[in-house]
Image: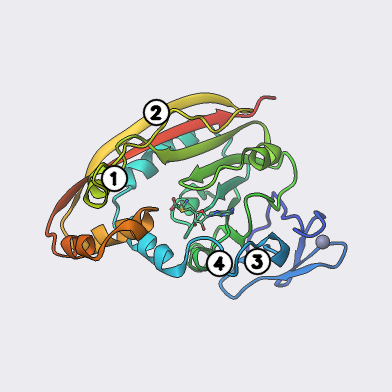
Amino acid sequence: MTNNTPTADYLCPLCNETLLLTGKTYRCSNNHCFDEAKEGYVNLLPVQHKHSKSPGDNADMVNARRSFLDNGYYQPLIDKLKSLYQEFANTNLAIFDAGCGEGFYTHQYKTDNNQVYGIDISKSAVKIAAKRYKNCHFSVGTLSHLPFADNSIGWINSIYAPILENEFTRVLKADSYLLTVTPAEKHLIELKSLIYIDAKEHDTAKNPIENLTLINEEKLNYTMEFNNSNDILNLLSMTPFAFKASAEVIEELKSKQSFSCQADFLIRLYEKSP
Ligand SMILES: C[S@@+](CC[C@H](N)C(=O)[O-])C[C@H]1O[C@@H](n2cnc3c(N)ncnc32)[C@H](O)[C@@H]1O
Ligand SMILES: [Zn+2]
């Protein structure tokens, strides 16, 4: 990323000093160096923060999600997220997409006036995010140790990703916002019903955030109509219950010419007090 300067400078994941970009290398005052990859992202995940060799979503899941999202099934969600951002955010401040996956939501927020950051622990995801969306800053990193200074971010998105309240609160500026999207009761219930005999609805009672103020909560429910089995299989591959699907269920999905399934999202917006 050479054509725009970050306004929320990255911090070194080893010593927390500011990283400055010179050429294609980010360097801190203690001379820890992180090279920009050819796709344009930087890997800020040191081995000591890694709990497995390839943490996060693997390439198959990432590619399935990209194909599915590219086909527009979640467009109503994007429209809703963008309208909340326009309504509440100070759109000049830095935005951070936490657990950004392949950058599908991340890039929707980019304007001429802001800097947009996406972090994910999955290198496969960050690689294709950075390759496609050149106008955003992508890095491999962990949400439990964010490479941002305190009070440096104006808007955080957490879409179907782990919510690390303490870190999110630390990096948010006062009067700024955290938006979370989690499954509402009937999310993908028809797909789940093919896999589980007694498919359970999602439990939405628990509010995972305690130290920010919930200022807006709404559900978005609509039915997705599928007319090809590839999209259904891609959707299945994106879900945590994919590994529970038997060979028979996969065959059944492959043979489906049409399928209706609910998308049901719970969208919560929190504000950090002054
Ligand atoms: C269900 S995906 C959602 C991706 C994207 N937000 C979307 O909705 O398309 C969850 C993402 O969180 C990432 N993730 C899981 N644990 C993480 C962590 N500790 N730090 C950073 N990313 C993490 C995964 O690699 C995966 O890309
Ligand atoms: Zn350092």
Q: Which of the marked residues, 4 or 2, is nearer the chain's N terminus? A: 4
Q: State which quarter of the image contains the N terminus.
A: bottom right
Q: Which of the marked residues, 3 or 2, is nearer the chain's N terminus? A: 3
Residue 18, x across and y down, in percent: 80, 55
Cα separation between marks 4 and 2: 32 Å
Name the residue tied to disc 2: 218
Amino acid beneath label 4: Lys
Q: Residue at x 45, y 69 (%)?
A: 59
Cα separation between marks 4 and 3: 8 Å
Tell which tag, 3 or 1, sits nearer the viewer: 1
Amino acid beneath label 2: Glu
Q: Residue at x 24, y 66 (%)?
A: 247
Q: Which of the marked residues, 2 or 1, is nearer the chain's N terminus? A: 1
Residues under numbered marks 3 and 2 in contact, where contact means CB atoms less than 8 Å apart:
no
Name the residue tied to disc 3: 43
Residue 231, x across and y down, in percent: 25, 60
> Residue pushed farthest front?
197
Amino acid beneath label 3: Asn
Name the residue tied to disc 1: 188
Residues under numbered marks 4 and 3 in contact, where contact means CB atoms less than 8 Å apart:
yes
Which numbered marker is on residue 137?
Answer: none
